Amino acid sequence: MSHAVSVMLKVSFYLGDKFTSENTLFHSRSTLGLDVPLSEGMSVFQLRTKLDMWEYAGSLRYNFLRGGFQPYAKVGYGLTWYRLEDGSINGQGMANPNSYWVRRPGFIRNLWPNTLHLGAGVDVILVKDFIPGLHGVDGGLRAGYILSRHELGVKDLTGDNGLQGIVVEPVHVYRNTFELLGTLSF
């Protein structure tokens, strides 16, 4: 239905000249929908909802070059949790328009990663020492691509009153993320 525009907080720690540890907190909201033509061909069954998704991810990144231009590749894992909100059928709100949170991490429950990702991109330092009086504070841009593979975590829905016979675990989806970020390094 729509492309998600997301908020991301990323903290990177450089482990020497080539390796970087990255930690990311990601939040995304997007509209999802399904239009099914009905048998008479004149009307359409419309299902609409909003996806509220959170993710914490950790990555190990390898920088191919040093200095102000750093192409990189990375691999990592993460915890992803989500729910559907404001569900409607043909414009009418559902009786229960919000789902429960799927895979939300807790103290003991759902701490095992359910998302793996691969990525590549480039960091470019555009301005060195751009804050007067603070030596070593640089500003730049990062452009990158990440392919994530999520295990949806719908195993709990396959019981007697759930999706028995419809869902075969594990169910995976893939997400493509294109990122353009401003960077502040010191």
Image (cartoon, rainbow, N blue to C red):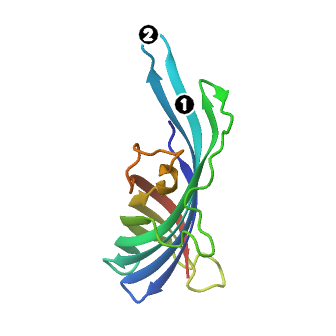
The residue positioned 37% from the left and 71% from the top of the image is 75
In the picture as drawn, the residue positioned furthest to the front comes out as: 160
Q: Which amino acid, by three-letter code, is at mark 1?
A: Leu
Camera-side residue of 86 and 64: 86
In the picture as drawn, the residue positioned furthest to the left comes out as: 64
* Sequence order check, earlier mark of 1 and 2: 2
Q: Is residue 61 left or right of residue 135?
A: left
Q: Is residue 45 left or right of residue 147?
A: right
Camera-side residue of 159 and 90: 159
Q: Is residue 137 above or below residue 32?
A: below
- Tell me the SS state at disc 1: strand
The residue positioned 42% from the left and 59% from the top of the image is 151
- Res 89 label: none
- Tell me the SS state at disc 2: loop
* Spot occupied by residue 8 in the image (x, y as percentages of width and height): 57, 62
Camera-side residue of 34 and 166: 166
* Spot occupied by residue 155 in the image (x, y as percentages of width and height): 47, 56
Q: Which amino acid, by three-letter code, is at mark 2?
A: Glu
CA–CA distance in space, label 1 to label 2: 18 Å
Residue 161, quarter of picture: top right
Disc 2: CA contacts within 10 A as few (<14), some (14-19) or many (>=20): few
* Spot occupied by residue 100 in the image (x, y as percentages of width and height): 63, 51
Q: Is residue 134 above or below residue 177?
A: below
The residue positioned 59% from the left and 42% from the top of the image is 50
Q: Name the residue that disc number 1 marks.
A: 47
Q: Is residue 31 left or right of residue 96?
A: left
Mark 1 touches mark 2? (CB < 8 Å): no
* Spot occupied by residue 11 in the image (x, y as percentages of width and height): 55, 75
Q: Is residue 79 visible?
A: yes
Q: Is residue 120 visible?
A: no
- Res 40 label: 2
Q: Is residue 63 above or below residue 90?
A: below
